[in-house]
Image (tube, grey):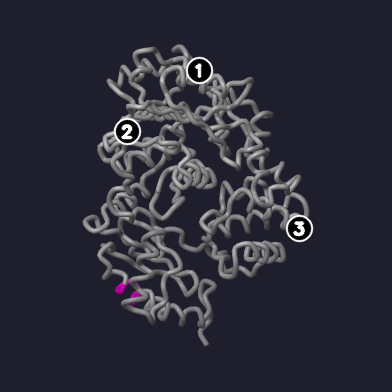
């Protein structure tokens, strides 16, 4: 028997040609799909990855997503896929998933008769990463959006997302207020949706706890408190303040089909920066109102006095918070002729492509194993060392008792087979309450500080979290 070389046994060496042959056969079958320009399949059974170059003619949006995926994003941003039909730059996955659910699934800003014509002019104040901008403009190629966001990272995400989908979006990295000037704002990197000029760590922590407590399993006591507190680490930032009247004039807006405002307790300031001429051009308005000191009733009254038909509601998950949504529509607001689906091919994510290719493989080569994951690339890696995310030499080490406990808890939550190194907490359906459960189970078995509360938001892969649990025992 030949002695092992570089830690590879004869058995492992003999298995490699079989794995390579299987990967080559899978790649040839996948390459017959029109969305695939080129592909290679690497790795052993159970960890097999297909690296796919999307075809620019048959899957143009997916090809653009691959190119965007290789582009460097500004610091603090990463690419997320909160749904099969959406790839976007965001701050953290749990927030991207939250925004998708609130804005796209629940249609938080398009209720009570609020509708958009195909050539809508939209002002998105408090755009965050641009989720509403994408939701409103993607199905309407003739729409024009003015997106306003004072946090630099979030404004950069909105710009990157608009560019990815080729939308007519102007991004302004500033705040809106009653008068021009400068102001300080509080930015929560772990909970950016609550950032703003009037942020208060104590109040905002209670609002976040109130939101989490309305979910199933939300009463997880100290773990929920630790998770919430970890999400509220704050940074102070300076920002320019302009008025909506000023920026609308600069942009040459002769009408606003929808003015959307979500600015975390600064909504009254934004409204105070609208002059009478601009008010007459606003056909519909939707805003989140923090009902502090009777603010909800005052704003509803102001809108009715200006000729809007007004309604308001509250998300059941926010019933323990002061947050309400207000909807105003003028009787002569232009109707929407239809409720269109997003324009173009839905193939813009690795997730959607993976589903299509698994179906394709099952039809054309049912005896071949489907890859465990699909990665978008702009060119096929030629050598093993060129493969993105190639396993490290330590990946095959026997698990310690702490890692074994973590694996047991992870698979209890997400199911058998979910303990792949690249399996992602959020891709598997995890959310803040799942994180609370994970922390609770880990600390019951391994003691306090087994895992930092914010770990799932910084490296949510199975391998990354397992390594963190292992390191916490040293």
Please name the residue that numbered disc 2 is placed on.
169
Give 48 or 100, whichever is nearer the viewer.
100
Of the numbered discs 1 and 2, the one sitting upstream in the chain is: 2
Q: Disc number at residue 63?
A: none
The percent position of residue 180, horizontal first and vertical second, equals: 44, 12
Residue name at image x 72 percent, y 57 percent: 442
Q: Which residues are magenta?
A: 24-29
Q: Disc number at residue 269?
A: 1
The quarter of the image holding the C terminus is: bottom right
- Indicate the secondary structure of the residue bearing disc 2: strand
Main SS of the magenta part reads: helix
Q: Residue furthest left?
A: 57
Foreground: disc 3 or disc 1: 1
Dot 2, crowdedness within 10 Å: few (<14), some or many (≥20)? Answer: many
Residue 174 lies, with reference to residue 192, above or below; the image says above
Please name the residue that numbered disc 3 is placed on.
446
Asked whether residue 157 is in view, the answer is: no
């Amino acid at each position: 028997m030949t002695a092992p070389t570089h830690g590879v046994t004869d058995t492992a060496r003999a298995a490699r040609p079989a794995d390579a042959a299987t990967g080559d056969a899978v790649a040839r079958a996948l390459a017959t799909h029109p969305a695939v320009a080129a592909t290679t399949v690497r790795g052993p059974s159970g960890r097999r990855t297909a690296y796919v170059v999307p075809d620019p003619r048959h899957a143009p949006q997916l090809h653009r997503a691959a190119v965007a995926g290789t582009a460097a994003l500004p610091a603090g941003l990463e690419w997320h896929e909160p749904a099969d039909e959406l790839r976007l730059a965001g701050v953290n996955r749990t927030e991207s998933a939250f925004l998708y659910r609130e804005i796209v699934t629940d249609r938080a800003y398009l209720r009570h008769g609020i509708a958009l014509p195909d050539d809508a002019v939209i002002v998105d104040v408090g755009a965050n990463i641009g989720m509403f901008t994408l939701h409103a403009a993607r199905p309407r190629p003739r729409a024009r959006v003015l997106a306003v966001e004072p946090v630099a990272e979030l404004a950069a995400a909105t710009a990157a997302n608009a560019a990815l989908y080729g939308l007519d979006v102007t991004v302004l990295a500033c705040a809106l207020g009653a008068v021009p000037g400068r102001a300080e704002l509080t930015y929560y990197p772990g909970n950016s949706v609550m950032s703003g000029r009037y942020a208060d760590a104590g109040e905002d922590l209670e609002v976040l706890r109130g939101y989490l407590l309305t979910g199933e399993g939300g009463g997880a006591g100290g773990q929920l408190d630790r998770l919430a507190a970890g999400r509220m680490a704050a940074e102070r930032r300076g920002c320019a303040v302009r008025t909506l009247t000023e920026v609308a004039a600069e942009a040459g807006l002769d009408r606003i089909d929808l003015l959307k405002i979500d600015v975390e307790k600064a909504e009254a300031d934004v409204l105070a920066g609208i002059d009478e001429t601009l008010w007459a051009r606003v056909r519909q308005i939707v805003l989140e109102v923090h009902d502090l000191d009777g603010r909800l009733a005052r704003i509803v009254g102001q809108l009715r006095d200006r000729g809007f038909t007004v309604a308001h509601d509250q998300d059941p998950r926010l019933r323990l918070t002061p947050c309400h949504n207000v909807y105003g529509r003028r009787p002569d607001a232009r109707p929407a002729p239809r409720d269109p689906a997003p324009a173009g091919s839905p193939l813009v994510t690795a997730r959607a492509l993976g589903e299509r290719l698994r179906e394709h493989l099952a039809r054309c080569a049912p005896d071949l194993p489907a890859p465990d994951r699909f990665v978008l690339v702009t060119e096929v890696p030629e050598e093993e060392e060129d493969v993105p995310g190639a396993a490290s030499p330590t990946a095959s080490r026997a698990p310690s008792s702490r890692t074994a406990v973590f694996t047991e808890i992870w698979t209890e939550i997400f199911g058998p087979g979910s303990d792949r190194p690249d399996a992602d907490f959020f891709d598997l359906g995890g959310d803040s309450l799942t994180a609370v459960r994970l922390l609770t189970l880990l600390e019951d078995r391994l003691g306090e500080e087994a895992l930092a509360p914010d770990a799932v938001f910084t490296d949510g892969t199975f391998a990354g979290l397992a390594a963190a649990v292992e390191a916490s025992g040293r």
